[in-house]
Amino acid sequence: MVCRNTSWTRRLVLAGISTAALALSAPFDLAQAQETIKVGLVAALSGQSAKSGEAITRGLSIAIDEVNAAGGINGKKLELVSRDDESNPGKGLLAARELVQREKVAVLFGGLDTPVSLAIVPFANQAKVPFMGVWAAGTNITRNGAADNYVFRVSAVDAYVGEALVDYALEKKGAKAPGMILINNPWGESNEHALHDALKKRGVEAVGVEKFETNDVDVVPQLTRLKQAGADVLFMVANVAPSSQVVKSLDRMGWDVPVVSHWGPSGGRFTELAGPRGEDVHFIQTYTFTDNMSPKGQQVFAKLKENYGVTSLADVMPATGIANAYDALHLSALALAKAGSTDGTAVRDAFYEIGGYDGLIKTYDKPFSPENHDALNAKDYVFTHFVKGEIIPLN
Amino acid sequence: MLLTSAIVTGLGLGSMYGLIALGFHITYTVSNTVNFAQGSAMMVGAVLGFTLMVTLGMPLWIAAPIALAGCGVFGLIVERFLVRPFVERNSDAWLMATVAGGIIVDNIVLFTFGKEPRSLPSPLATNSIEFLGTGVYPLQLLIPVVGIAVAVALQTVFRRTDFGKALLAVVQNRDAARLMGINAKVVIASAFAISTALAGLAGLLIAPLFSVHSDMGTLFGLKAFAVAILGGITSATGVMIAGLLYGLIEALVTAYLGSTYTQIVVFSVIILALALRPNGLLGRAAVNKV
């Protein structure tokens, strides 16, 4: 009985304290809400893809600092609120709801995983809040068939990547009989369609399509089939570890075939895993930090050094995530400024009004229209390869 | 060329499945329980090997025994905390407990070892050699040799040594063995340690051909359990043969029919084989006393 009494007293005291805290904090929150415009990020901040979330956060934060240093948006400062989706579509959707309904973010940014983004798309369209993709490349994220589309993207699009890979293979590698080696998941499938479509347009047909699993040790049987079918170039779509299994298997077979790849290899220690032959794989990126970059590139790289202790170019491995997020934030800031409010529909329509913007990846000219919600296209990709652990653009 | 490369691939992976499946066989015969964290034990072997050799720079001949001992300790822990408490209370919950144990270990490794897959280099897996018209790494030829040698050695130990005889005595009749002065608890714990050490050996052998990461063992553990059932979990020879067969069928189907059909055909063959021989290839029917 005595025990019970103390515990009740304790609860009452606690309740009292929390009520007081609420009462004190509520007006403070309100005051703050009037001074800042919140933007949200739902991305993988833990687990296997945590590095991508970190890159996006860095890109967004550097751009937000720049916008705020220049006086903010119509006098209000931008503020980033982040939530971890753990690469899980359910958690991503929950986080998106929370950011929109409780935090009242004006623009929502998305992460690496196509399935997570696809889960958020219907909610964003229904809640009428602009959802800006900065990494996931699934074609139907922006082309989602909604009558009222609030989803934008500054990143690669599988449909365009297919075009870019096919052009590169046919023109630069003189390929006539391409083969495909694809990871067996929705991402691989999305690219299989894109590659087939791009090949068909150019009157070429794939001589073989082979799938493999993320944890396959030996891809020699699949590759031997492609070799016997007469493939003279391989299109590869897989994340870093499975991609390296393909390269190791090629090395073992002694098959010296050009490999043209989606951006999977850029996500980790590709040359450590794949061995020296990893340097022969040519893959796309939307941006790379190099020795001779634009003034804007130098400016962002200086900030990376200053804020995050980045020391060398090899340290900024997911450069794509940083650059996409950086440009996407600046474009969103332009839309917010034009809209003059944080009303979702006004901001969405303001995205269409953006004229020119001198960005990190390129100089954008009317990047968005009601028909086109993707700011980057096949011409904006750079082909790169690894040299001593650093991603270097090819000419 | 297609045939030789498929056979080399198949025998290599098949003997890995066989080694891990032997672990299922050993604990099952001794205690009627299995450790579903066998896949994680394989991963622990590779991760310890990487840490000792690459991070700490130890030579192979010191690192390998330490890594295997580490896997053995993992087996002891699984037996003591995830199997014994449930068996003593006549519960089958060790099934779930060992699955859960594996998931916990995978996540601890993800947290401590890191999320990025790493590479364990080996001089036997850097330059490919010509073998019957196809290119292979020397390690690929060594793996089936080691796998079969270990299986044979294990059989010899069981038949010829006092420890082996004690183990078999516990299998035949636990109470009688106990009356003869054999400590059944120690024998069962050792069986778990041996089984995880075998999985660890598979992990060390496969790592240079693969990459080292926290979920590298999941699929192996699953396939190895299928192999153990296919071979007849009570027969060591059957399990090893089933492992090699599984690897070969997998590689041959991929090579001749294409990867789309691999899993469909392989698992259909397993179901068919079990329909024809419900106790596995060389397994004995369990006698149900009524």
Image (spheres, coloured by chain):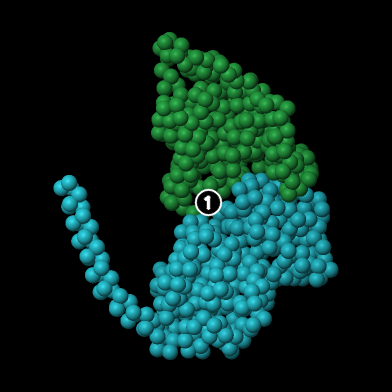
Chain colours: A cyan, B green
Report the residue at 58% width, 69% height from top: A122
Quarter-of-image position of residue A324 = bottom right
Report the residue at 65% width, 35% height from top: B14
Residue B158 position, x and y percent, is 54, 18
Q: Residue furthest front?
A: A1
Say which of B272 and A234 sits in front: B272
Disc 1: which residue: B118
Report the residue at 63% width, 46% height from top: A217
Residue A124 position, x and y percent, is 54, 72
Residue A321 position, x and y percent, is 53, 69
In which quadrant of the rendered image does the C terminus of chain A lie?
bottom right
Residue A377 position, x and y percent, is 66, 76
Q: Residue furthest right?
A: A203
Q: Is residue A259 above or below residue B92?
A: below
Q: Is residue B272 above or below residue B284?
A: below
Circle 1 — which element?
A: loop
- Left or right of B178 on screen, residue B128: right
Q: Is residue B125 visible?
A: yes
